Amino acid sequence: MTPAPIRIRRREVPAHGPWPDTVSPVLQRIYAARGVTTPDQGELRLARLLPPEALGRVDAATALLAEAIAHDRHILVVGDFDCDGATGTAVAVRGLRLLGARRVGYQVPHRVTHGYGLSPALVEDLVAMAPDLVLTVDSGIACHTGIAAAKARGWQVLVTDHHLPGEQLPPADAIVNPNLAGDPFPSKALAGVGVVFYLLLALRRRLRDAGAFAGAGPDLASLLDLVAVGTVADLVPLDFNNRLLVSAGLRRIRQGQCQPGLRALAELAGKDLATLSAGDIGYGLAPRLNAAGRLEDMALGIECLLCDDPTRARELATVLDRINAERRDMQQQMVDAAEALVAALPPTAGERPVVYCLRDADWHPGVVGLVASKLKERMHRPVLAFAPAEPGSDQLKGSARSIPGLHIRDALAAVDAKHPGLIERFGGHAMAAGLSLAAADFEAFRDALARQVATMLSAEQLQSELLSDGELAPADFGRGLAEQLRLAGPWGQGFPEPVFDGVFTVLQARPLSGGRHLKLSLLPEQGGVPLSAIHFGGGTDAPLPTRIRVAYQLELDDWNGRRGVQLLVRHWQPV
């Protein structure tokens, strides 16, 4: 499979400053290119967090919870089977207990047994738990039938979600979602864990005003480590408010003030808590939590996050680590199969398809999102990957990943409007979505989606582009800048990690891991000393040119105590 050609373009840098001398000029231009042009805009203090009362409908939601706490009712938190849902569930359970709730439990749907969210099948399994109030986290806005089933049982239902709503809202007693029409909350980018954290902040204020606490009330900042992990893992845009939440959570983690489960996961991932970054969360902690929901039961991940005993937390984290290793092996097999499917597809009028819809009877429904993500990055096309809902099923579960310029949920909504009943269920965001449909309707859906996407993407948007923060001088290739970049962010979706580019002479190139990766020694054309570099997934049988233009990240290299730097190659092209 030939990856999409990539164009390297340098970001525009507006006028900025003045900044303190302690902030590298390189970092100043990086911030400016992301809209942070003054020190004040870069000051990430929790005092600047948007107030909880700004969130729409939060008063009705806190009234429900306050009444449930006052009357010692059973509150059951229903989460989701991804990292955002797991951390959000842990935040809800821990937070409600801090605020005085004595009867708080949780349940998370099983991907295969129950499907997504508060489904009728899950409601049936919750009957034995006899909840009085069901609180959904990171789900619920699309769970009309499940919420109706819960209401028919006499339960109250409070929905907290951040996914985009449909034309009609579910019949819940209260809904908190910053993406509801007319909601005044300025930040629409809160993750599910962020929404429930804000609900707890508002609940604490209500209880404090009612005289429930002698002072300010419990310190909910103790939950910010979980909020940071869930926010980063869900790939929501890191707008200023989300950066405040993630930055505060990272500070607590780096100071060792984190849940035992997160500490154990970080240790198993080989990450140093003292220098943990958002990237470490995304590539180290989040996959280990997500693996439980993908292959087994996310209750295992939630239990790890709720565990206060370090020894038990380590045991649970070790199981999650093992499941993640299984997930990696399965993912690689599925990606290999997906690449073979793509290679076998005939080009459309000599061009790549505008969208890829792929399915395989042997794929696992919990891993198709990762397959779609991998292929989206390589092909620069929206990708939807489908697997049977369970072995032998005639129902397909699909996961979609999109590229800038295409709101994938809007595309699915347009297909649904033009072809009612073709999609059985869907939901999601601009860049990611999930859906289900009958296997017999796969080809019809694939063709309808291709027609729709063709009307929504321009030729320019189909050109893969890598944005660079410019060139580094020879003196910049040191630990000082690398350390500052690591701790400067937090970097993530909407506030991307710095990438630089320049021309280098290739002194050495050798394959790693059976040829899958490439280890390099590069000499900057501007001069200086040879630099170590690695290109994951960049293995090739062909010899590299002597001179190449490289897009790269500057990273610390502390392997075996060497305390150096290395270039993480994102892309190279001949000069």
Image: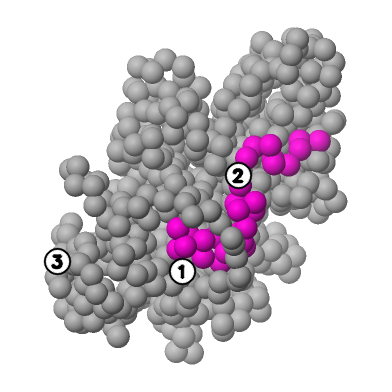
Numbered disc in front, either 1 or 3: 1
Image: 200 above or below 563: above
Is tag 2's residue or tag 3's residue first in the polypeptide sequence? 2
Q: Which residue is mark 1?
A: 469
**CA–CA distance between discs 1 and 3?**
28 Å
Mark 1 belongs to which amino acid? Asp
Residue found at x 19% / y 75%: 506
Question: Which amino acid type is marked by label 3?
Answer: Arg
Residue 372 at x, y percent in the picture: 46, 60
Q: Position of residue 163 (x, y in %)?
A: 68, 48
Residue with the mark numbered 3: 510
Q: Which residue is tagged 2?
A: 44
**Side (left or right) of 257 relative to 483:** right
Of 551 and 344, the residue lying toward us = 551
- Cβ atoms at labels 1 and 3 below 8 Å apart: no
- If you read the primary sequence from the N terminus, does the residue marked by circle 1 or circle 3 appear first? 1
For the record, the magenta segment spans: 24-53
Residue at 78% from the left image edge and 12% from the top image edge = 212
